[in-house]
Amino acid sequence: MTGQHLLLGQVLRFDGTPFADIGAARHIRRGAVLVVDGRIADHGDADALCAAHPQATRHDYGAGLITAGFVDAHVHYPQTAIIASWGKRLIDWLNTYTFPEEMRFGDPDVAAEIAARYLDLTLSHGTTTACSYCTIHPESVDAFFTAAQARGLRALAGKTCMDRNAPDGLRDTAQGAYDDSRALLNRWHGVDRLSYVITPRFSPTSTPEQLDALGALWAEHPDCLMQTHLSEQVDEVEWVHDLFPEARDYLDTYERFGLLGPGAVFGHAIHLTGRERARLKDTGASLIHCPTSNTFIGSGLFDMDGLMAEGQRIGLATDTGGGSSFSMLRTMAAAYEVAQLMGRALHPAELYWLATAGSAQALRLDEKIGNIANGLEADLIVLDLASTPAIAQRAARADDIWEALFPTIMMGDDRAIRQVWIGGVPRG
Ligand code: GUN
Ligand code: ZN
């Protein structure tokens, strides 16, 4: 559906980051968003926009809250079917649940079925962009991008490269990782709304030769993002020290192979040294907070306040299926709880910014998605702020938008997602 649409309801958007100024969050009680040919053409007061655009098709959501769709900055779509697997910490969890499941993705039919399942699940939870790891198999990347393309989504993904410390059938080589990644990049990067992401899984599963080869590929394609994992669990950090005795720290195992810079996206980033924090900041890399995963796998508490204060670029993610939910609402709730344990209550505006504009910025897509601003792509959601009896009775007592929104952040799920718009098209 192209043409002109006027979405009417409450509107929430950001003029900047609420971590610097809470006033950057802008709420209009009776607002409107004008969508023209897939982009946001205007936004503001409902009466004024209705008068100015009588020709636009109206979609009146009443008290529904219109915002940007959620941007999930770190997921593993192949782990969809093993989410909520019991009782293991990171390395055992990978060996017990993850690697056997990822083995199945050499079959294009399996990959296509799970990619479709993943995207339909996350869309129903209001996520309009995900940045996904795939598996070692090029077929798994083709399946994800094909499914995202069919749904008109902006999506990011890459082949997950591993050439050691992984089982037979789940390892490539340094040259194979370079060749496969380059071929996939050439096939998909910049096609429709899709971006290829160079993806070494993490330094324990890559030899120095493979990291070097992927660093070379990134140098040849600096407009791509590079994603990997960094300092998730203490045991993992110690293992990295054993595997790379010459490295100064975990980050250095990437830095020395050209895998650090603007466009580097590091998942978890919990147990960081002072040097690592300084280098991440100076190079313009992004850190992705995965709070449900960090509690579920027992990894640790992300230092949101300290890292924000030093000016790091930070996004938010479910980390499906190490994370225990597909919902960015549940993920915001976990981010709130983790920050509370660190002594800081994140404001609802900060949480919502992280799940939308912050993640878009971390993926260097903030000029395309993640906010309501003229010219951005119209990936929008409409929230029902009274989606369950428990939420409704609390929201009924609210004096302002933040008190009305916070119960949905803390207790909401896919039932709170009333409508999703993808590139100016309402879904379903
Ligand atoms: N570190 C390396 N691979 C993974 C993964 O699949 N999930 C999580 N949470 N951490 C990882
Ligand atoms: Zn991950």
Image: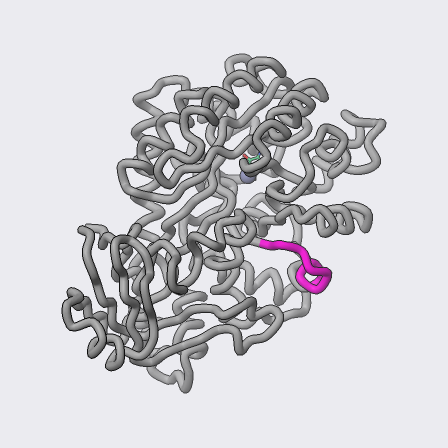
Report the residue at 23% width, 70% height from top.
61
Extreme-front residue of the structure: 52
- Whether residue 42 sits left or right of residue 259 in the image: it is left
Question: Depth check: 23 or 301 in front?
Answer: 23
Boundaries of the magenta span: 306-314
Report the residue at 18% width, 51% height from top.
1
Report the residue at 37% width, 41% height from top.
193
Please say if 310 is above or below 169: below
Looking at the rendering, the quadrant in which ligand 1 lies is top right
Question: Depth check: 328 or 13 in front?
Answer: 13
Q: Position of residue 96 (x, y in %)?
A: 53, 28
Q: Is residue 309 magenta?
A: yes
Report the residue at 55% width, 64% height from top.
336
Residue 271 visible to the viewer: no
In which quadrant of the rendered view does residue 405 lie?
bottom left
- Whether residue 127 sits left or right of residue 21 in the image: it is left
In which quadrant of the rendered view does residue 254 lie?
top right
Question: Depth check: 172 or 360 in front?
Answer: 360
- Whether residue 294 sits left or right of residue 188 in the image: it is right
Q: Position of residue 397 (x, y in %)?
A: 37, 84
